[in-house]
Amino acid sequence: MAPTQPPLDTLVPPYIRKIEAYVPSKPDDVLRSMYHTSSLVRMNNNENVIGPPQKSIEAIMNFTPERAAIYPNGDSYHLRHRLSEVFRHPACSFLIGNGANEVITFVIKTFCQKGDNIITTDKTFAVYEWAAGFSGVEARLVPLKDHAFDEEAMIGAIDGRTKVIFICNPNNPTGTYWSEARLRSFLRRVDGRQIVVVDEAYAEFVDQPDYPEGMNLISEFPNLVVFRTFSKMYGLAALRIGYLAGNRNLVDIIRRTCIVYSVNTLAQEAALGALADDGSHIRRTRELVRASKEFLISELDRMNLPWIAGEGNFVVIRLPVSDTLVYRRLMAKGYMVRTMTGFRFPNHIRVTLHDLPVMEGFVQALRSSIA
Amino acid sequence: MNTADTAELIVGIDLRYLPVVTGMVEQSAITFGLTKEGAQNLCLAVEELLNVLAAAPGAGEKIRVTVRDGGYYTEACCYFPPHRIPVSALNVTKVQNPYDESVIENLGIVLAARVVDSLRLVREQDGLMSICFTMDKIYPEQILPVQVLPPGPYAPGPYGQEDIKQFAQRVQQAYPSVIPEFFRFPGKVADMVRSREFGIQLATDGKGNIGGGMLWRQGEKMIDSLGPYVFVPQPGLAEAIIQKVLENVSRKGAVCMVNRLPVPDVPKAFFEELAPPQVEDNGLLCERPLYRQLDEDTGSTVYVHPNLEPFVRQCIDRLVLPRNIVVTTYAGEFIEPHAAFGVQVARKRHLAILSTIVAGRDAAHILAQYVSSLDDDGITRIRFKLDLGDESEQVLVPALRSAGFSPCYLLPWGGTGDIVVFEHRQRQGS
């Protein structure tokens, strides 16, 4: 006799029933086999093609296998203290997470309950909306204006149940950013009534004088929370480590929802190595991104393909055909890009910038894939 | 148990409960908006089914009957243990000889299918069988007097119920030959949207005029779309509508969108053609749907009978699909003696779509019976959906061929895996 199935229609909350699980991509070896391609260049996740900084590599190399048996430090003590030195905030103002995705859920769990809402935009990093969905919280999506967050419309969307406002600065995937003046103006208008999260996942790629260092505004705006990650510029995506920073009283509250021991020892030590870099890693990466962005844009102009390129190591390209079709054609040629239909940019792809030889091959493949 | 739009009853499979069941079905259907006649038809279908189920052995077993307000229809579903209904009964599609007792015992299902607007028969995930009968609600037909629309501009934006009704009427005017019948009933279209089974995006001028729009049915994995329809010569309007629709549906979990009735205004840049051109060269009339994936395709395995392998390979190569193709081989293993097929009949569209419930040895015979019976019922298009994600179904390919079905196109992710849609050859030109 078949075992009795649990009554999922009564056990599972309605807001979980109505959301779809995120299905990650298959491993590269499986994808290569599926698409019958001997090589696969990853241009889909905005990883740093240079890899981690030298000091992070050394930290990883120095990790002896025996240490895998020992639990990590539960709240990344040394890393928080190093961040405290770098950004001149108390160590207790930092919370380390298993990637920035985890700290997003910490914030939503801390401040939101049924009936509350968060505000973000319709075309940005999907995890704010997704985490709100599985937490039973409404995500209010304010359309981008000129590819940038629209502060006027976001202010207009706030009501008595708005708890958190997420701003991706610079925005993934459009690369637009709010200047310090614009961010300050927005924070003043919010006037401390809601939590404002500024996600600076791509901050280290920005080399613009008016780009705000969110960390410097925390003392002035106690409702501000800043997200950073080691996955992008610092090339530690595989180790999953990111963090948030904010006013210590705020972080004390957020800590209540924080999952301790979720950040492994290797990630903590590699992140410490990244913070010890003398700046050469960032300079080298920025130079690669600048050169390949220039190259790609000039080639796209020759192909009459519209593009969106702001700050960050990626460019969004508008295609004359379906992005999901071009994805398959590019995969068969060994190039994995990110389709943008899921970002609400149908018929667009986002391409992570690589060094020039790879970009040249990609342009050739793209040309034949849209023919 | 009653919820806002569903009534439910669980009773033993026993004719003693017949008045209870029919009473509940009839009263619920009337409450949910059917006419008395419509409610009685639904009732008759359920009654006939209960008669068949009660005749089978099995003590203490129960039937769950639900009546649901679908907004523009009312649906009665019966859930019961599958052994209660002989597989052969599911396939009795017409009565050859009314004095043949073996036929008479299954007559109920035949009758049941004839009195309702549609019938859906599926094997549920929990092992139960379900048969759902649907009766559409009655709406007045409305034709809008021809009115020239102001030049606009029009843009995708918010809309109200009156806008939906105006849209339906303008679709009738602009595309009279290539649209589903429901557009003749604007109130029904409004209720279809209200039911949330359908989504809609309209382009308006902000002054109460509708310049175009798109309607779609949101399935779990697949979205069936209609349009974009445009009523004004505004360049880029169709693109703006489809773009907005894709933005709306892109994070709702569906993996693909299909448009089975494309009109010339569909911007081809957003879609792929599924049907290979040479299918029509072979003289087969296939529908030519447009398709769009909503997710990155990271691959799957398809099981293919050797007879179908060249067709599937051709489709996969043309669409650049990442697929592991496993060619199935028969090596004397057990096959169910009797086949059973689910059938969805859209009587007003003269369309039937068959799919597999049980792949059995008598499939060719059963399929031939279906074709004959549906033909008698005035069904002019018969399709068969073969799921390449289910290896057990591949044994049906020779039976499909011999029953007169030919493959038309491969629909990626149309079932548990990709599906191949067959069309019955004898239907062409009818």
Image: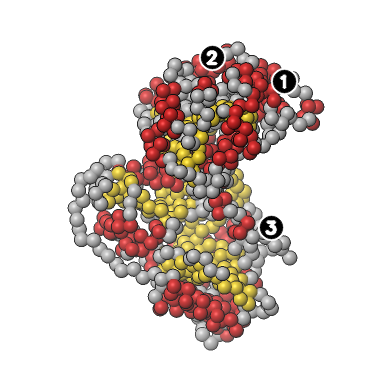
Instruction: Residue at 51%, 67% (x, y): give it.
Output: B6
Tell me the residue that label 2 is attached to.
Answer: A283
Q: Is residue B15 above or below residue B403?
A: below
Find out whether the residues at labels 3 and 1 contact each other: C-beta distance under 8 Å: no
What chain does badge 1 belong to?
A
Tell me the residue that label 1 is attached to.
Answer: A61
Q: Is residue B282 above or below residue B80?
A: above
Cα gap from disc 3 to disc 1, whole angstroms = 54 Å
Cα gap from disc 1 to disc 2, whole angstroms = 23 Å
Viewer-proximal residue among B41 and A198: A198
Is residue A351 visible from the viewing direction of this image? no
Instruction: Residue at 63%, 70% (x, y): give it.
Output: B82
Q: Position of residue B307 (x, y in %)?
A: 56, 54
Tell me the residue that label 3 is attached to.
Answer: B331
What chain does badge 3 belong to?
B
Find out whether the residues at labels 2 and 3 contact each other: C-beta distance under 8 Å: no
